[in-house]
Amino acid sequence: MTKYTKDEQALIWLCACTELEPRERAELLRVAGAPAALFERFEFFYEKTFGRECPCKELEDRKRDLGGFLREAEEKGYFAVTVLSRDYPDGLKAAFPPLVLFGAGRRELLQEELFCIVGSRITPPWAEKFGMDIAQKLSSRFAVVTGLAEGGDLAAVRGALLSGKLVCVLPCGLDECYPAAHAAIKEEVRRVGLLLSEYPFREKTKKYSFHARNRILAGLCRGVLVLSAGEKSGALLTANAALEYGRDVFAVPYNPGISRGVGCNELLKKGAYVCTCAQDIFDCYGILPEEEKAAALTADEEKLYNVLHSEGELHAAVLAERAGIPVYEAAALLASLELKGLVVKAGGNRYGCVK
Amino acid sequence: MIAKIICYALSGLDGVPVEVETDVNRGVPSYDMVGLPDTAVKESKERVRSALKNSGLLFPMNRITVNFAPADLKKEGASFDLAIAISLLKASEQLIGADVSDTVFLGELALNGDLRPIGGLLPILISAKGHGFTRFVIPAANAKEARFLGGAEIYPAETLLDVVNHLIGAAPIEPLETAEFAVCKKRTSSADLKYVKGQPMARRAIEIAVAGGHNLLMIGPPGTGKTMLARCLPTIMPDLSFEEALEITKIHSVAGILGEEGIVTERPFRTPHHTATTVSMCGGGNRVVHPGEISLAHGGVLFLDELPEYKRSTLEALRQPLEDGQITISRSGGTCSYPSRFMLCASMNPCPCGNYGSANLVCTCTPAEIRRYRKKISGPLLDRIDLQVEVDNISYDELTSAGKREDSETVKERVNFARKIQRNRFSGCKLRTNAEMGEREIDEFCGLGAESEKILRDAFERMRLSARARARIIKVSRTIADLDGCENILPKHVFEAVSYRLEEKF
């Protein structure tokens, strides 16, 4: 069983006390000096700090249950990384550090250099594919940090799952899953990567917890890539937090007029780095490019690909006509190109070029 | 005196012989019916009484007992009227010299003595012929339906008096001439592929679907022509063979929806509304089990427009008939089976607002909403749909070749070609189309080269296809190869089959 010191146990208990606001907890710790001291004489310090009696009587009960709480976490395979732990990520200290991070999976990933990829829930198919590829490439040098939502997050998750260098930070306790439909992928991440959460494991998602989670994403990583962001996207919150903590911010450029890319283009205007391939990010950190093998294409595939490459996104029938290939044969060729990772289905029989 | 007349009742698609026994005795005048007749049969008392009187025949003022044997079978409907009338006449000695022993009498009586048509005549004739009966008296209005039964003497009669005159030899009725089955040359539906604008991908998909008997799902925004495409399906399906036509006619005859023709000459196209209940879809009823939409679509197309709007339980009920090609319905009154080998064609919008994947309209649905919408169709059902194709609303000004549109006849020729290959392939077994193949047949007929195997493996990894999708893809590739006239499945066939599979989200 993982051994926690008295101070660490006190911190875990404090974290389990969700009745207290994070700011209140920090204040209490400041006044008490040491977590263990706060644990011993909680009511005394509470009165000293806030000048009134603690209204919540459950906190005392929870002290008695702490052993059970830790045992349950242990049984479920969760571990707690506290601010006092040796492997607590330094980067987080800038980001109003969570006192405890509950984790499941490969704890050693915290030692890796982390890079964050985020995107809004509604991300165009080509950007999802692009995000997948980037995540896959980045995971050769970084561990990828992201959330578990649809769209951009999921693209990053899928890209990095192959290498397993993947950290997902949840806006809820580790038992919960938001969105619920991603329960299977959450288990997959837990198996090959690392799940993190600052909440006790049964805590449900709250409105504000996404905001709080985004600060952890930004704090953990060296840089953030924004795959897609509308005018008011959660991805922008992460990017802003990252700027605040002095991280590098990258954004994927969009055509003007695409509402899902307005936020990205705004970031670029404000001076974010442009990212059109993984090497853009590697260049920033002085990582040399690796030789990439171009996929072998047949003559017909080449024809189709060239047309699509110059146009960006096209309807399959238009594409086939321009390339001079019968539609049904084009369907087969496009499926082949899709398997080779060069094009992606954009819905409505349209195809987009990703490389 | 006792008279015995043979008549038929229906149980599912099978006719069951019923003996109508009538005894006319001296005594206080009375008229009783025994042997489990239902209300409609009991009411025949009044019809028979009036019909006899109005035909100038005598209704015996004696003690009359009519018995239906076997007594344990529940008799329903008005088709026994003629048999009761004839047995009464025979028992009251008004048909001296007439031989009625081996004749089957079928028909409902009007009060003035006219004979009215009955439902389910063809299945009764076929069963009765199987039981060794070869002489029938039927209502003239049913003659069209009956004339396809060869090897039997069938006498169509207009009125009860005609029947009596025929039996006593006063005015014999000419037996029906057996008609040759001819496929309807002129279609009643005006749908034709040449009126479908653009949609090259969907056109190709329905061609493959029909060629291999695969089920089809069309996904697309409202107003993009999904329904029109579906209506073209019967126009490119192979012509009915006589056996098939007879089988379909039997079902339609039982359901009472047989048209003027008397035999079904076109493949059925059934479009139950999405408010359909499970019973109307699968068949059922209180005592007599009526065929449902899936049986009425046997040999043709069952088109479910707006698939997610159907009740979940109704859709799930389709799973077993889709697999087995027949449905067995059990009620307390008995069990019966109806064939239901239909091609399922369904259509749906891509999301609640309908604009997902549209080139120029903005979809306002959240991913969760889209997921909820698509989840209405269960995985196992989706799994039985081999081809999933997107129908789009691209403006076809962009396409110069849009003017060149094939008509249904041209496509039908290619379908017939592919079907012929399949007939030869399955000549030894009872399969008809590629879609019906099981694991054993896939192993036997769908050998993939090493390259194709690799493509399939890649597709599984890249597109996260479920393992169960594999067999479906292989079967579709087999059909595409057949359309191509290729004996072996080539990589391009596999690729095309893969492209008709929508990515299954994690």
Image: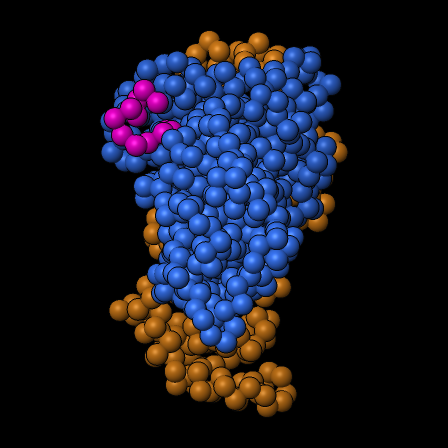
The picture quadrant where one finds residue B462 is top left
Residue B240 location (% of width, % of height): 47, 27
- The one nearer the camera, B26 or A201, is B26
Tell whether B446 sits left or right of A44. Answer: left
- Colour treatment of the image: by chain
Majority secondary structure in the magenta region? loop
Residue A150 location (% of width, % of height): 54, 48
Q: In this view, does A102 lie above or below A233?
A: below
Q: Which residue is at 43% across, 37% downward? A: B247
For chain B, give the colour.
Answer: blue
- The one nearer the camera, B30 or B240, is B30
What stretch of residues is rendered in magenta? B423-434
Residue B60 location (% of width, % of height): 52, 63
Residue A116 showing in the rendered view:
no
Q: In this view, does B360 lie above or below B421?
A: below
Is A262 contained in the magenta span? Answer: no
Tell whether B467 sits left or right of B280. Answer: left
Q: In this view, does B147 lie above or below B292?
A: above
The picture quadrant where one finds residue A317 is top right
- The one nearer the camera, B18 or A284, is B18
Q: Which residue is at 68% across, 22% downward? A: B195
Instruction: Tell me which chain appears orange.
Output: A
Is B433 contained in the magenta span? Answer: yes
Tell whether B430 sits left or right of A298. Answer: left
Residue B324 location (% of width, % of height): 36, 44
